[in-house]
Image (tube, helix red, strand yellow):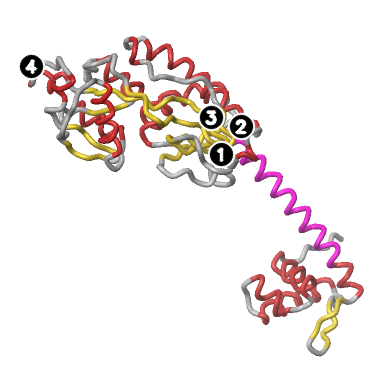
Amino acid sequence: MEKRLPPLNALRAFEAAARHLSFTKAADELAVTQAAVSYQIRQLEEHIGRELFRRLTRRLELTPAGVEMQAAVQDAFDRIRATLHKLADAAEDKVLSVTTLPTFASHWLVPRMGHFQLRRPDLAVRLDSSMGLGDLNHQFDVAIRSGLGQWPGTVAERLVEYRLTPVISPILADRLGGIRHPTDLARLPLLDYNDHEDIRYWHQWFALAGVAVDGLRSGPQYDMQAITGQAAVMGQGVALVCPAFFAADIASGRLIVPFPDLILVTDRSYWLVCAQRRVDEPKIKAFRDWILSEVSACEGQCGALGGSLNVGLAGPRRSAMGH
């Protein structure tokens, strides 16, 4: 007759007590009372009909049956743990976790993610939209961030140079009787995002245009480029944006680019970033290959918007960080 297996809780209590040779330490590890551990082990001893511990003064000692039982239980638990790790790792390999900037996510990445899913239907993409880099060793597989490409412990590959040009709604432009010279823009509210950083870029753009401005008229302030661009569509002011993110608005005429030859090349770029130790993982390499191909395709599409409106996609450049 087949022997019925004992309760799992009794086996867990025995394994911990046998490892520590202490009911008290086993109870602490399992977050239960010492009495509960003692009860579970007594139940196990009654189940198999043998004593597993010699209960000596202030210490425990395994009986021969306890030694044999410990080896069997430890081996079984090790096998279960190994199988769980194997299954968890296999499941994790089927999920690609990407953290990216909100505007890059909504205006560039999300519209193209279907292409990646067609290429890799075996990978489920989990997309996070945030400003911080995050933990690329455990929390996320890859990140897309803007900056100088210098994040310790990572490999950063440049995707897109951070190029900016003013955009304005045709309705707002008509109110001024048209935009003929860069000085016309200085008379309008200049939309601001990212903690006034683009006010610095506005000064740089006017300098590029050869226009000296004493003061700039700051318009409403928003916390991301996507909202700033939408505010420009609504006629709230002039936005300084990456034109590739607003290609649909420009193509439809909701936004116009009054000075397509005046493109400010900033000191920043958009980067694909991953932990240095994970750069050769298959799912990360698959995403890298795909996004670089999309970047290359976008270069031609954005160029069709009109010469200098090309987003300035640079050739791939890897920056091994932490040196």
Q: CA distance from mark 3 to mark 2?
A: 16 Å
251, above or below 139, in the image: above
Residue 234 occupies quadrant: top left
Mark 3 — residue? Answer: 157
Magenta stretch, overall SS: helix
What is the x, y in percent for residue 19? 78, 70
Name the residue carrying label 2: 283
The location of residue 155, given as percent across then percent down, is 57, 35
Depth check, mark 3 against mark 1: the one in front is 3
Residue numbers of the magenta segment? 70-95
Badge 1: residue crowd in 10 Å (few <14, some 14–19, many ≥20): many
Q: Are marks 1 and 2 in contact (CB under 8 Å)?
A: yes
Q: Residues within 10 Å of mark 4 (few under 14, many from 20)?
A: few
At label 4, the amino acid type is: Gly
Name which residue lies at 24% across and 20% down: 209
Say whether residue 86 is magenta.
yes
Which mark lies nearer to you, 2 or 4? 4
Give me the residue at 53% from left, 35% from top: 273
Residue 274: image x %, image y %? Answer: 56, 37
**From mark 1 to mark 4, how far is it between C-alphas?**
50 Å
- As for residue 81 lying within the magenta part, the answer is yes
